[in-house]
Amino acid sequence: NSNFHRALALRARIALLRGDNEFAIKTYKESFRLERKTRGQRKKILPDDYDSIYFMFALLKSGDNKLHLEAIKFLSETVKLKKIRLLNIFSSLLHLIQELCGQKSDIFLDLYLHPQKHFTRSEQLLHFIIINWIKPDFLNNFTDSLIKLQQETENSEYDWLRAETSLLLAKLNHKPEENKKLGEELHSKCRTCSLVNIISPLQEWEKVLRSLNTITKTAGNGKNQPDQSTQRLIWYFDYNPENSAANLYPRIQKMTKSGNWSGGRAAALKTLYKTSGEMNFLTPADRTAISAIREYDRGYYYHSYELDFEMSLALPPLIGHPLIFLNSNPDVQIELVSGKIELSIEKQADNKIAFHLDPCPANSENKLLVIAETPTRYQIIKITPQIERICKIIGSGVTLPPEAETRIRDTAVSLSGLITVQSDIISNQDIKKITADPRPHLHLLPFQDGLRVSFRVMPFGQSGSSFKPGVGGRSVIAEIDQEKIQARRDLEQERQLVTKIVESCPNLSRQLQGENEHERTIPEPREALELLLEL
């Protein structure tokens, strides 16, 4: 039996390299079935040799999703063994096929992308072919190894290996015409076909679509689907004002018999990372945020990694999400809103004009900033490459001479599509001009047994950014619904309206203001209730 299954594997390999993929798959399956029978194995574990790799290549080449899922079963059982000679190859293949099937891979790929010293020439080449499918750019690190392998396979016993090595070097733009010609001539001589291009590397957008298609299929199968109203995912939000950053802590709540939501249990990131496709109660925003879970190498011992959110990708989908609560006070529901960097343009006493950004990223690595607009409202500001360039140019602030005023007006309008502009200089350009809404908005947040009150104004009404009353430039330029609009603020009227409210509400006027002059705290419950009546 042992000799017979090896003979079958050899026939299957020849069929694969000659282009008869269907026969190769059928013969490999029979070969491995016989070997498992000989060993008394029930689990689908691959032999630790390169015919197993060729078998997986045949399943890959088929393009059949069912066969890809079968390959995942083989590889998943095999890599669990850990102490196998071809672990790096099998792990890389498992990661690749899981991505092709739209599954989340729990393989920490960086540990397995390097061919091992004990690999034979054939195994080394097959690993290079896999790297070429997963991370083509990463293959550049092995150009010298491929050149060496090409030189070592010059005699006719290794024509197929040399042909494939030459085609890989051509893809890396190393003597592309010469190596492509050599590879094709050698394949023609051997009457074989190449495996280098049997699949194409997946683009990031393809991975997203494949994952979404998997979710759709899972949701539509109608099996074991829980009642969507009995569970939900909520998010605890932790804010760090020192570096304008935040953390997320997902929790799963269940509906109790009394019709109330439970306190919820922490949702393990590993569980979300691997099985979120089976959770039918998740919203599209939840799924997009979960897709931002990444593997990070802990770095302090071998094969050690942890999962965490990449916040620049996880927070934007949660803008407007109705179930976000403060981690420090879970009874307090908060709001995430889209925000923009603000550019202040101020005329100084000597008629010079000062530019100042708020906020300005502390370093160029920040791709997202979180700003507390009020205690219950947080701005999520994406740092795009254009905004990053603006920040590098302006930095901590620049001062321009008076003669630059005319050109500054044009620049302010030009930048308003990317950032919010507050200016003492009125634009002469033909853009829509409105009178800013001066009415104060009050944001209420539970504080001790009472309330904290914060004052804001929203010059563009319910659209656009909010500001402290009576503070900032008299002109605000922003892009609202793809239209550039300039709002003229009356700072004195904004201050007067706030003063009028404070004077009209005894429970506001009696309270000492906080460190922020636009904030009041009412810690006693009776006074807080009276304030609500007054308001």
Image (spheres, helix red, strand yellow):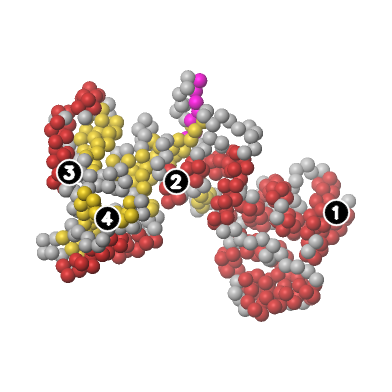
Q: Nearer the viewer, mark 1 or mark 4?
A: 4
In the displayed structure image, the side of residue 429 where residue 292 appears, left or right:
right
Residue extending farthest to the left is 349
Q: Are marks 1 and 2 in contact (CB under 8 Å)?
A: no
Label 2's element? helix
Tell me if residue 28 comes above or below residue 192 in the rendering: above
Q: Nearer the viewer, mark 2 or mark 3?
A: 3
Separation (CA) of disc 1 from disc 4: 79 Å
In the displayed structure image, the side of residue 527 where residue 116 appears, left or right:
right
Q: Amino acid at mark 1?
A: His
Q: Which residue is mark 3?
A: 494
Mark 1 or mark 2, which has the lower sequence index? 1
The answer to if 255 sits in the magenta stretch is yes
Tell me if residue 291 comes above or below residue 149 in the rendering: above
Tell me if residue 189 comes above or below residue 8 in the rendering: below
Q: Nearer the viewer, residue 167 or 302?
A: 167
In the displayed structure image, the side of residue 402 where residue 331 appears, left or right:
right
Q: Amino acid at mark 4?
A: Lys
Task: Please provide the residue range marked out in magenta.
Answer: 251-257
Q: Which residue is mark 2?
A: 317
Q: Which residue is mark 1?
A: 5
Determine which quarter of the picture holds residue 429.
bottom left
Q: Which residue is mark 4?
A: 432
Q: Nearer the viewer, residue 535 or 84?
A: 535
Mark 3 or mark 1, which has the lower sequence index? 1
Mark 1 or mark 4, which has the lower sequence index? 1
Separation (CA) of disc 2 from disc 3: 33 Å
Q: Amino acid at mark 2?
A: Pro
Separation (CA) of disc 4 from disc 2: 31 Å
Q: Nearer the viewer, mark 1 or mark 2?
A: 2
Q: Residue at x 33, y 51 (%)?
A: 480
Q: Nearer the viewer, mark 3 or mark 1?
A: 3
